[in-house]
Amino acid sequence: MASYDATIKIMLLGDKSVEKTSLTIRCISGFFLEDLKLTIGVDFYSKIINIDNKKIKLQIWDFGGEERFRFLLHQYCKGANAAFFLYDITNRLSLDHLPDWTQIIRE
């Protein structure tokens, strides 16, 4: 039997180098790490949180932002409950590409 009441699958999407992995590790561990490596395909993290006396398992899927990995996205998004689209405020192209990411999810 599971040691939690519900699971929420969350996708983190966006161009490479928008710090998706940094945000994920901050959420999971509570601190930022420097010098993180490129995500190849997808990385998966989980954390149990308590909401209204319920144990909720967060599954955080950190998807690699390089275009060569996008063909994998449809498979990994199945069953997702939420998606966060990230961009880098110092990189205008990462903002301009957000509609591309949302279109991929909608397909």
Image (tube, rainbow, N blue to C red):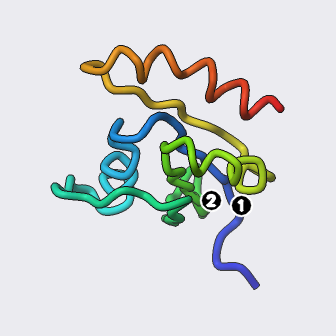
Q: Which residue is mark 2?
A: 54
Tag 2: amino acid: Lys
Say if 58 sits above or below 95 in the image: below
Q: Position of residue 47 (x, y in %)?
A: 49, 65
Marks 1 and 2, how far apart in space?
8 Å
Q: Position of residue 6 (x, y in %)?
A: 71, 61
Q: Which mark is residue 33?
A: none
Could you tell me which secondary element the residue under label 2 belongs to?
Answer: strand
Could you tell me which secondary element the residue under label 1 belongs to?
Answer: strand
Label 1 with label 2: CB-CB less than 8 Å? yes
**Identity of the residue furthest to the bottom in this view:** 1
Query: Looking at the image, which is closer to me, 7 or 5?
Result: 7
Mark 2 nearby-residue class (10 Å; few <14, some 14–19, many ≥20): few
The quadrant of the rendering that contains the C terminus is top right
- Residue 40 in the figure: left or right of residue 25: right
Q: Which residue is mark 1?
A: 6
